[in-house]
Image (cartoon, grey):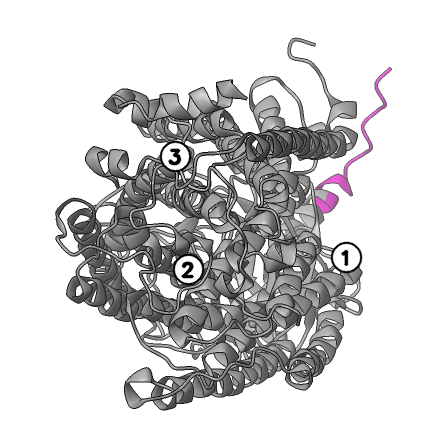
């Protein structure tokens, strides 16, 4: 007993910079590390995107050899998925989950430190492949064999990096599950939890189930490349399509890993600025659970053209279309939360509204692609590229930015500049549409994805898209400025309840949130929870 | 770095001194959390092995080790 | 020969294509698109009404309800009905896409890094013999223009019928007859490629070790262009699919001209062998 008290006391000693940031077991510091890391990676992956859009600005090759272009497309995907979207959601989880459930910290603080510090090493490995003989793996982020096996020795580094990222996110998810299931303050029942916690609880189970499957797929690939097995080599009796099945069994739940926490964030922001409880809280929880379940039985819709049997095509078409139902419930519930509310449009709300619109557009193209015959015309074209960028940029990334604007005053104790934050928003929301909407047209006209050069008929929309791309990329520099200004220079102090109608335990803490919070479990007062009456 | 060190020390002190009863409840819950973590880790390991087993049926029967 | 519905500048929608299946897919695509537009108008419309009517700056007071069973049941059931309405035609059409029976011609398509090889397997119920495979690689003028800093304007690459066919032209196109159901057997020689002619709605991955099939019955002669759509290495953008559809009699004449040298050769050998005494069997 006294040892615990001593431990608490010990941490109050002044920590050196190294102790605080490298040896930290504090969920808030680790959350900050995750968010800073993914912020850095956003610009690494973003710079790849800028190079890609620059090469695609005009037909003909102007800047790079096609092989390097292929390295860029693959790395852009890997960095954005594993380096930006996933770690930033884990960072938000680290910061917010203990504060939202009244826990003193994550359940396994030292594991938490490990799961973050694996990441920088994984990305050093991954990015170092650019400088290796033969270059980085150039088979896209999906790494389909046999093509990927033609790459140089660097694929071993990529595979090891993916193993590390997988271990990192598995450990992070174990921690989140253990925290949510075991460390809730007494009286905070599961169905009283904020939606963000719910979304992460379910997401964690997806991570637990599918990250090992990705590890299995790339392990087999490693053995094929270096140890003479023939898992995916048809000439040796293997099956290249099996890789795609294993990969997408991971890959489809993975896209929900990247969007479910976003649903959680939006379900926090919308009620706050509508001054009205979230509509259909329980339906929202069940919808997320339902989406998570369905995500395991739809993977082959990524493979409609590989020559599946007719029955499989039809099954995966139906299961995929079914996902539209719970997703629709979520969208309708957000809109209904706003209906008859008392809306104000602070910066986080703007991002949340943009999220709903852009994510819904991405969802619509998703329903269109679920139709097998139509997918035969869309498959592997820019229509797909437009679709998943709408859900991952307009969806996941916008929700993360919205979440940062929502909770940053709580984290730093200071307000950011509203003017610059709004400029960041409007510039982003316009440019992201200039960037990605024309890609629908390109795909429908027949432009395949992952090509560095194209027919002149595709030139005009590509140029529009590239202009939007540079604009969107440059706009994110405003974000850096806003965050740095807020954290280090802003004079405006934030109140404990930063937003007038923000409910949830995190808002009962002072701003900035103290280094150690809820060392004694709070007494749960239902009126302080985000959902008011949760009996429905 | 989101919080300045002086702010940290200002806010360092918990609102209430933890009582023994509350702390042992926390310790109990932390032990439960460790159990949960092991169970979840086992699930993850099972999925990893399952994916390899699935590959085994296609890949391993045809394996010719290098040099044979 | 007129260019078929190949991509044009500023194109914004799917082409209707040149087969009955591609037109049915276009109808399905448009139906799905309009359903999405209608739902979008409803959802975004409701949201924007809320944004403009229920503003706090206009003195809106928030309601406190957070639940409405009837509404929630409705917006679970109605989308299911809409989806069923889309899934039914899609299912029937998928069956049609998969039905390669009754093809009068079979062509084997093999993807290599970075060219297509076409072998005529059978035509009108008979195996095709003596026709050399067609190796279909990027045409030389596109190939020259696509090199890094080539200095050649891609827009200057124009086909004989006036189509700007940069990266969409090949040395030797696949030639098939009009009005004939052609079955394509698609496979890969090294890595996975993808064989796709948008106007035919014929699209399958070309996977080493696996034989996929697709079919098309094109009525209108013309030149139809597509591209490899599965990332297959550095020259992925430079392996177009070009299919020349010619009237049936013209095709028959072309095919027999192709078969001719082989037939002649065999005839010549027969003629040579005929008058000569059979060589004594070697002991």
Placement of the C terminus of chain B among the 4 image quadrants:
top right
Q: Earlier in the sequence, mark 1 or mark 2?
A: 1
Secondary structure category for the residue under label 1: loop
Q: Which mark is residue A127?
A: none
The answer to whether mark 3 and mark 1 are in CB contact below 8 A is no
User: What crowding class fits label 3: few (fewer than 14 Cα within 10 Å), some (14-19), or many (20 or more)?
Assistant: many
Magenta region, main secondary structure: loop
Depth check, front residue: C132 or A525: A525
Total labels: the figure holds 3
Horizontal side of A219 relative to C3 (left or right) equals right
The residue at which mark 1 appears reads as A309
- Dot 1: within a 10 Å radius of its alpha carbon, few (fewer than 14), some, or many (20 or more) residues? few
The residues colored magenta run: C270-283
Q: Which mark is residue A389?
A: 2
Secondary structure of residue under mark 2: helix
Q: Decide: marks 1, 2 in contact (CB < 8 A)?
A: no
Quarter holding residue A218: top right
């Amino acid at each position: 007993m006294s040892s615990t008290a001593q431990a608490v006391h010990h941490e109050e000693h002044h920590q050196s910079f190294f102790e605080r940031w490298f040896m930290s077991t504090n969920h808030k510091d680790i959350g900050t590390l995750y968010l800073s890391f993914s912020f850095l990676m956003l610009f690494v992956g973003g710079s790849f995107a800028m190079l890609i859009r620059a090469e695609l600005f005009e037909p003909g090759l102007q800047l790079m050899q096609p092989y390097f272009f292929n390295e860029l497309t693959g790395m852009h995907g890997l960095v954005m998925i594993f380096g930006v979207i996933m770690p930033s959601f884990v960072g938000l989880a680290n910061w917010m989950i203990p504060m939202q459930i009244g826990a003193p910290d994550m359940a396994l603080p030292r594991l938490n430190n490990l799961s973050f510090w694996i990441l920088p090493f994984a990305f050093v490995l991954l990015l170092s492949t650019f400088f290796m003989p033969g270059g980085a793996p150039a088979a896209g982020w999906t790494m389909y064999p046999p093509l990927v096996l033609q790459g140089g020795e660097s694929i071993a580094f990529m595979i090891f990096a993916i193993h590390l990222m997988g271990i990192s996110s598995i450990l992070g998810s174990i921690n989140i599950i253990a925290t949510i299931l075991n460390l809730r303050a007494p009286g905070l029942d599961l169905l009283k939890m904020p939606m963000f916690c719910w979304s992460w609880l379910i997401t964690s189970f997806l991570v637990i189930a599918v990250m090992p499957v990705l590890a299995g797929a790339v392990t087999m690939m490693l053995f094929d490349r270096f140890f003479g097995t023939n898992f995916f080599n048809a000439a040796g009796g293997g099956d290249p399509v099996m890789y795609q099945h294993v990969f997408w069994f991971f890959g489809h739940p993975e896209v929900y890993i990247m969007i479910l926490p976003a649903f959680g964030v939006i379900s926090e922001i919308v009620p706050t600025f509508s001054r009205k409880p979230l509509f259909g809280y329980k339906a929202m929880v069940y919808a997320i659970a339902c989406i998570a379940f369905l995500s395991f039985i739809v993977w082959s819709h990524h493979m409609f053209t590989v020559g599946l049997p007719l029955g499989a095509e039809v099954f995966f078409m139906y299961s995929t279309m079914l996902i539209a139902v719970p997703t629709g419930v979520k969208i309708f519930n957000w809109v209904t939360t706003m209906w008859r509310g008392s809306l104000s449009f602070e910066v986080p709300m703007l991002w949340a509204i943009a999220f709903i619109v852009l994510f819904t557009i991405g969802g619509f193209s998703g329903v269109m692609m679920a139709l097998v015959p139509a997918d035969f015309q869309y498959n592997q074209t820019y229509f797909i590229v437009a679709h998943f960028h709408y859900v991952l940029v307009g969806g996941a990334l916008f929700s993360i930015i919205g979440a940062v604007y929502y909770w940053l005053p709580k984290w730093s104790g200071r307000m950011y500049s509203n003017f610059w934050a709004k400029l960041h928003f409007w510039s982003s929301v316009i440019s992201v549409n200039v960037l990605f909407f024309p890609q629908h047209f390109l795909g429908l006209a027949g432009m395949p994805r992952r090509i560095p050069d194209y027919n002149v008929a595709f030139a005009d929309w590509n140029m529009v898209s590239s202009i939007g791309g540079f604009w969107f990329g440059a706009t994110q520099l405003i974000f850096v400025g806003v965050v740095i200004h807020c954290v280090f220079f802003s004079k405006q102090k934030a109140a404990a309840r930063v937003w007038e109608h923000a409910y949830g335990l995190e808002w009962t803490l002072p701003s900035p949130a103290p280094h150690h919070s809820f060392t004694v479990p709070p007494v749960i007062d239902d009126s302080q929870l985000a959902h008011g009456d949760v009996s429905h | 770095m989101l919080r300045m060190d002086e702010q940290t020390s200002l806010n360092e002190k918990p609102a209430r001194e933890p009582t023994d009863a509350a702390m042992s409840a926390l310790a109990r819950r932390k032990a439960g959390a460790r159990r949960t973590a092991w169970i979840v880790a086992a699930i993850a390991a099972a999925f990893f092995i399952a994916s390899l087993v699935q590959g085994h049926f296609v890949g391993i029967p045809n394996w010719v080790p290098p040099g044979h | 020969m007129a260019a078929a519905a190949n991509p044009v500048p500023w194109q914004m929608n799917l082409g209707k294509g040149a087969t009955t299946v591609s037109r049915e897919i276009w109808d399905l695509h448009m139906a799905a698109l309009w359903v999405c537009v209608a739902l979008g108008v409803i959802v975004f419309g409701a949201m924007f009404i809320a944004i403009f009517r229920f503003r706090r700056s206009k003195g809106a007071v928030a309601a406190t309800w957070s639940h409405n069973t009837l509404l929630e049941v409705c917006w679970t059931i109605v989308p299911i009905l809409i989806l069923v309405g889309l899934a039914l035609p899609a299912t029937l059409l998928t069956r049609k896409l998969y039905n390669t029976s009754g093809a009068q011609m079979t062509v084997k398509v093999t993807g290599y890094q970075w060219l297509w090889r076409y072998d005529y397997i059978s035509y009108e119920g008979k195996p095709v013999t003596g026709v050399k495979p067609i190796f279909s690689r990027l045409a030389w003028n596109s190939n020259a223009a696509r090199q890094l800093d080539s200095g050649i304007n891609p827009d200057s690459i124009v086909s004989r019928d006036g189509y700007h066919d940069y990266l969409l032209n090949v040395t030797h196109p696949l030639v098939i007859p009009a009005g004939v159901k052609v079955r394509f057997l698609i496979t890969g020689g090294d890595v996975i490629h993808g064989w796709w002619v948008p106007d035919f709605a014929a699209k399958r991955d070309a996977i080493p070790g696996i034989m996929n099939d697709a079919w098309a019955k094109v009525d209108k002669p013309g030149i139809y262009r597509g591209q490899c759509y599965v990332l297959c290495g550095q020259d992925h953008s430079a392996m177009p699919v070009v299919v020349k559809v010619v009237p049936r009699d013209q095709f028959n004449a072309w095919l027999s001209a192709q078969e001719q040298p082989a037939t002649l050769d065999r005839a010549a050998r027969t003629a040579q062998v005929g008058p000569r005494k059979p060589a004594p069997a070697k002991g």
